[in-house]
Image: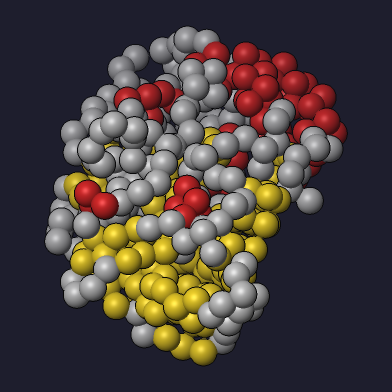
């Protein structure tokens, strides 16, 4: 029995990332990131939704609310900004910035931001490898910037909304190795399909195409001290709600519900980004007589997924869906046995 094989050629992307607000310095057309030790990010709430009917480069929508605190006894005036990147890949205009429809409100009042290029040589932050030039995907090409004034010991609320495309590849998941150094590593044991070799009549999940959406948290280090509280949630596209084991959310310690996934942190010092990887298209054996289930084909696969999920909280409804699409009786038993324990995992998310 032959399989359809898909090989990696060119990444197609409207960019994988979005980010925290950061502090910038500069005049004219160029700005650069800097450290603003007088201002603390007290709280951030990020809600990322998905629109199946939207254009590829605009399917993800972000609603970001940040609360900042002036730690000093003097009025502070500085430039705040939101990083942006240029597109890359097949069919993408490399001159285009990937974040679109960007809006800014300060204390509920609209502000018109300016999109400026960024001087890479002056960028700071852990997203640049120590002792190396900034070449990672998380390096900024530009930023939407706007002026900010904060009264002594005062607070202000900044709200940003925008659209972006996420990441998709026409190559299999197991060759995805070009992520920036501050992205969580996909350890060999994380994907369930690596638990055992598959047979000729099985779905080869390692050949599935990969998609991703990420939130750059390390830009939050441009502010003073830890972020007081951070909540970051992603919509799960309807198609993936039917196959929740296709998701590889990192870092672990999230709360997975049927239609969304949430990370929650307190006194947060971000050292790595938040990424939702997923299988975007699974290759079915070419000559198979009966279309196979997309659930776990072996007990080993179910056990590997449960082990990966054990450091996070998984709602029972998610497990029930996996049981429904899994035909292997031993795999079903493993899932049912783990359901209550996964639903009560203690994590940072309330």
Whether 202 is drawn above or below 325: the answer is above
Q: Is residue 283 visible?
A: no
* In the depicted structure, whether residue 48 falls above or below residue 10: below
In this orientation, which residue lies closer to the viewer: 328 or 26? 26
- Is 173 in front, or is 96? 96
**Which residue occupies 38% across, 33% down?**
181
Q: Is residue 195 left or right of residue 348?
A: left
| Residue ID at (35%, 49%) | 124
Q: Residue at the far front: name it.
A: 73
Q: Position of residue 167 (x, y in %)?
A: 35, 48
Q: Which quadrant is home to the N terminus?
A: top left
Residue 107 vs residue 294, the one in the foreground = 107
> Picture coordinates of residue 238 (x, y %)?
55, 54
Q: Residue furthest bottom?
A: 109
Residue 292 in view, yes or no: yes
Q: How many marks?
A: 0
Instruction: Residue 115: give x, y in percent of width and height.
Output: 27, 73
Q: Is residue 322 above or below residue 151?
A: above
Residue at the image point whose x is 29% and y is 31% from the top: 131
Residue 316 against residue 23 in the figure, above or below: above
The residue lying toward the viewer, choosing from 51 and 167, is 167
The quarter of the displayed image where residue 244 is located: top right
Q: How is the image coloured?
A: secondary structure
Residue 129, position in %: x, y? 33, 34
**x 41%, y 74%: residue:** 78
């Amino acid at each position: 029995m032959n399989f359809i094989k898909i090989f990696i050629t060119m990444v197609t992307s409207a960019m994988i990332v979005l980010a925290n607000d950061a502090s910038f310095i500069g005049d004219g057309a160029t700005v650069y990131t800097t450290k603003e030790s007088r201002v603390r990010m007290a709280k951030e709430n990020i809600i990322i939704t998905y629109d199946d009917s939207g254009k590829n480069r605009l399917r993800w929508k972000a609603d970001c609310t940040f609360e900042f605190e002036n730690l000093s006894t003097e009025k502070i005036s500085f430039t705040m900004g939101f990083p942006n990147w240029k597109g890359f890949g097949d069919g993408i205009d490399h001159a285009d910035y990937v974040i679109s429809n960007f809006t800014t409100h300060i204390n509920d009042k609209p502000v018109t931001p300016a999109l400026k290029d960024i001087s890479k040589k002056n960028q700071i932050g852990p997203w640049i490898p120590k002792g190396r030039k900034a070449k990672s995907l998380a390096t900024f090409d530009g930023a939407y910037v706007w002026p900010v004034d904060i009264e002594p010991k005062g607070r202000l609320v900044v709200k940003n909304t925008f659209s972006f495309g996420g990441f998709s590849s026409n190559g299999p998941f197991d060759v995805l190795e070009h992520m920036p150094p501050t992205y969580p590593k996909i350890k060999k044991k994380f994907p369930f399909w690596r638990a055992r070799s598959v047979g000729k009549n099985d779905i080869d999940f390692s050949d599935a195409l990969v998609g991703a959406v990420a939130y750059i948290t390390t830009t939050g280090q441009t502010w003073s001290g830890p972020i007081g509280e951070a909540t970051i949630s992603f919509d799960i596209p309807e198609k993936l709600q039917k196959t929740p084991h296709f998701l590889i959310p990192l870092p672990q310690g999230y709360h997975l519900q049927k239609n969304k996934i949430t990370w929650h942190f307190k006194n947060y010092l971000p050292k790595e980004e938040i990424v939702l990887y997923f299988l975007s298209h699974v290759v079915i054996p070419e000559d198979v007589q009966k279309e196979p289930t997309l659930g776990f084909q072996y007990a080993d696969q179910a056990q590997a997924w449960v082990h990966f999920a054990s450091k996070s909280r998984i709602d029972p409804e998610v497990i029930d869906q996996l049981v429904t699409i899994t035909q292997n009786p031993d795999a079903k038993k493993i899932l049912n046995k783990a359901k209550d324990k996964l639903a009560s995992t203690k994590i940072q998310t309330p």
